[in-house]
Amino acid sequence: MPEGEKTGQCKQEEEQEQKEEEREGLIEFYGSYQELFQFFCSNTTIHGAIRLVCSKKNKMKTAFWLTFPAVTLCTLNPYRYSAIRKKLDELDQITHQTLLDLYDYNMSLARSDWSMQSTRKRSSRSLLHHVQRHPLRRQKRDNLVNLPENSPSVDKNDWKIGFVLCSENNKDCFHQAYSSGVDAVREWYSFHYINILAQMPDAKALDESDFENFIYACRFNEATCDKANYTHFHHPLYGNCYTFNDNSSSLWTSSLPGISNGLSLVVRTEQNDFIPLLSTVTGARVMVHDQNEPAFMDDGGFNVRPGIETSISMRKEMTVRLGGSYSDCTEDGSDVPVQNLYSSRYTEQVCIRSCFQLNMVERCGCAYYFYPLPAGAEYCDYTKHVAWGYCYYKLLAEFKADVLGCFHKCRKPCRMTEYQLSAGYSRWPSAVSEDWVFYMLSQQNKYNITSKRNGVAKVNIFFEEWNYKTNGESPAFTVVTLLSQLGNQWSLWFGSSVLSVMELAELILDVIIITCILAVRWFRSRQQLSPLGPPPNSQDNTAFQDEVPALGAPHRFTVEAVVTKLPSYNSLEPRGPSRDGELGHE
């Protein structure tokens, strides 16, 4: 290597070493705030909420976003499916003749499927036989037994209408009567319609989704919806239903309140090829519910009017109940003695409907078509189960009276989510904009402009506030609360503290100990003072003792005289001879 290149390389190495020495220095510090916070987040021992800020890919950063609920939208009218079209046309003809006989009303019906006379005669024999078994009749009010007391009069003749239901052997019959002729015809038609649906061997034959012809526009957070955002199911009375945001893998979230941050739908409300005898309203039916919960359109749904823009604001509320000894709520329904027939989590309505369906299978031998089918059972059909209608209405009366006990068995869940809704209405489209709106719909969605305003409706569903409310339960008295209350009362009435209570407890303990000691001493002293028995060789003179004096007699004391003998002083006197000798000697 030439010397010049070596010299240049050496200079570069020296400069790099000098830069590193300048960087290291004696006192190091951060070159920017970013380096400071990066070092802090990487080396801090703080846990908890700080990780929401430090973590770059933490999904908890979106915890303050509200999860958008599931929204179910139904056509509000049962569809005339191609699989049962012939039988429905036949039922319409029988109903037409019935209305003509009862009300003298000539109902115009489409007879496209009645062109083949042989097919009509062959099919009408079977259906007519079952319809004649459950005829729609008009009777006097006095002749009916099960009538509500406040039933209003139908007309001046004061008569009611209903249909007859009999047991399998025709020994027991009753009239399912209604004060309104419209209600009676709809219920009678619905009864036969359910039997036709139950005769379908495969329920997929009724799965005729027509999303594009029902929902003209769908947007959420200003983004267009697609087929991945909804699921489809068929309802016997509400027709085709579509549930949005029911996919748990990719749920919608709303970061801001307002119409522009919610769900906006433009729906078709025309009633082409529907069943007028089964549904007497027009529009669409909407229900807001939580994910993993079935849409019970009868309970929580409401109708959307044609030609109207309905804006629905929501407020999310969560209820948390205390279980165990505080209430009879259930966590997941595993402790409820009712099998969950729905492929969803436990709710009170899921349990009640499952309870009725299980009793239906047990009592009537078949399942009601509106509810899920239990394992090993089949749906009720009067071609197989002749008297299922008689059994069903009897069981329904017991169910409403809680004879079956379903309302007591099914308990409320400990955690539940509800949505409080409020709606506002306005005319849509307006008079000045309806021409170009209908023209655009006709070009894009093949909308029939002749129906004009009665054929479309708009629905907006959004959060009213960017928060939610939680209603929780807590024990009124816990151990801590009880001790606190006792301490407060003690301080109020005795003016003492915890230390004083400990001193008083010590005093009581000392008193108990001293009492025990004194009791032991007293017992021992009693044992020592007790008289001993007589000696073995002593004589017992009790037989010679006087009797014990009476209580009132005076006590006598015996005084014994004690005589003390004086000592003998004879030793001090002189003896005789010695005395005399002594005297003579002197």
Image: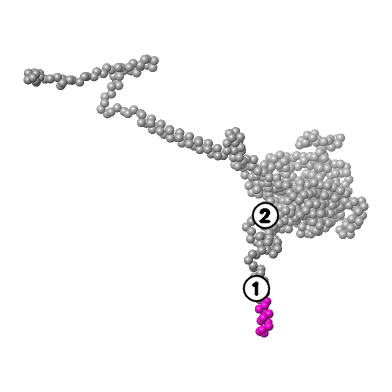
Residue 470: % across, % down: 71, 47
Q: Which amino acid is tagged 1?
A: Glu
**Residue depicted at 71% across the width and 54% down the height:** 63
- Give whichever of 244, 178 is nearer the camera: 244
Residue 7 inside the magenta-drawn segment: yes
Relative placement, left or right, of 558 versus 571 is right
Residue 310: % across, % down: 83, 49
Q: How many marks?
A: 2
Q: Which amino acid is tagged 2?
A: Ala
- Give whichever of 230, 90 is nearer the camera: 230
| Residue 87 seen in the figure | no
Asked which secondary structure carries label 1, the reply is helix
Instruction: Identify the residue position indicated by label 2 in the image.
Output: 49
Instruction: Identify the residue position indicated by label 1 in the image.
Output: 17
Predominant SS along the magenta part: helix
**Residue depicted at 80% across the width and 43% down the height:** 135
Q: How is the image coloured?
A: one colour
Q: Please give the range of residues in magenta.
A: 1-12
Residue 176: % across, % down: 77, 40
Q: Quadrant of residue 223?
A: bottom right
Number of other residues with Cα within 10 Å of mark 2, as a class: few under 14, some 14 to 19, many 20 or more: few
Quarter of the picture containing the C terminus is top left
What mark, if any, has residue 288 been given in the picture? none
**Residue depicted at 17% across the width and 20% down the height:** 569
| Residue 302 seen in the figure | yes
Quarter of the picture containing the N terminus is bottom right
Asked which secondary structure carries label 2, the reply is loop
Residue 491: % across, % down: 60, 36
Residue sitting farthest toward the bottom: 2
Mark 1 near mark 2, Cβ–Cβ under 8 Å?
no
Residue sitting farthest toward the top: 553
Does 408 appear above or below 575?
below
